[in-house]
Image (cartoon, grey):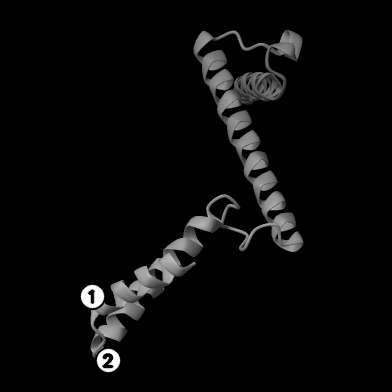
Amino acid sequence: MATATTSAQSGKTGKAENEDSSRLTSLKNNVSYLAYGSAAGAAVPASFKTRTVLKTTRYVLKYIFYRLIRYAKYVVISEISSLLHLSPTATQPIASSGLTSSATSRRSFFSSAGERAQQGHDARLDEHADQASLMNH
């Protein structure tokens, strides 16, 4: 009786070891296919669903990796640009720097006109004076 119980337990242990071994082999094949793609050789998963999921995961991970590399290059170029003073700020593109300064000057022009009106200056007289100064130049 004790021998029958021992043989039954050893049968379960052997079956469990085979399942663990096959799971480990399957995991190794899947990771290999995920890392190397179709170049993995014999490590291609047998299941179509598994291959599809692993291939999609591989493409998504590659996309994210290369996108991170791309943004890292932008950061490096921005830092080098700011160190060399090629643009006014590291986050502001060179082409838009003129737009920002002209917007600032317009704002200061209109605010100075409002201040002049509060001081009692007549806008029409100022316009005539400006026209006359332009005609003389």
Quarter of the picture containing the N terminus is top right
Query: What type is the residue that disc 2 sits on?
Result: Gln
Residue 12 in the image, given as x and y percentages of width and height: 60, 22
Whether the residues at callouts 2 and 1 have beta carbons within 8 Å, the answer is no
* 127 vs 72: above or below: below
Mark 2: give few (<14), some (14-19) or many (20+) Cα within 10 Å.
few
* 1 vs 67: above or below: above
Viewer-proximal residue among 23 and 88: 88
Residue labelled with disc 2: 119
Q: Quadrant of residue 106?
A: bottom left
Q: Is 76 displayed left or right of 132 in the figure?
A: right
Among the two numbered marks 2 and 1 on one chain, the one whose residue lies closer to the N terminus: 2
Residue 3 in the image, given as x and y percentages of width and height: 66, 22
Residue at image x 69%, y 22%? 21
Residue at image x 54%, y 10%? 47
Q: Quadrant of residue 19?
A: top right
Where disc 2 sits, the SS reads loop
Q: Is 82 displayed left or right of 118 in the figure?
A: right
The outermost residue toward the bottom is 119
Residue labelled with disc 1: 124
Q: Is 128 displayed left or right of 1 in the figure?
A: left
* 135 vs 112: above or below: above
User: CA–CA distance between discs 2 and 1?
Assistant: 15 Å
Q: Is 93 displayed left or right of 122 in the figure?
A: right
Q: Nearer the viewer, mark 2 or mark 1?
A: 1
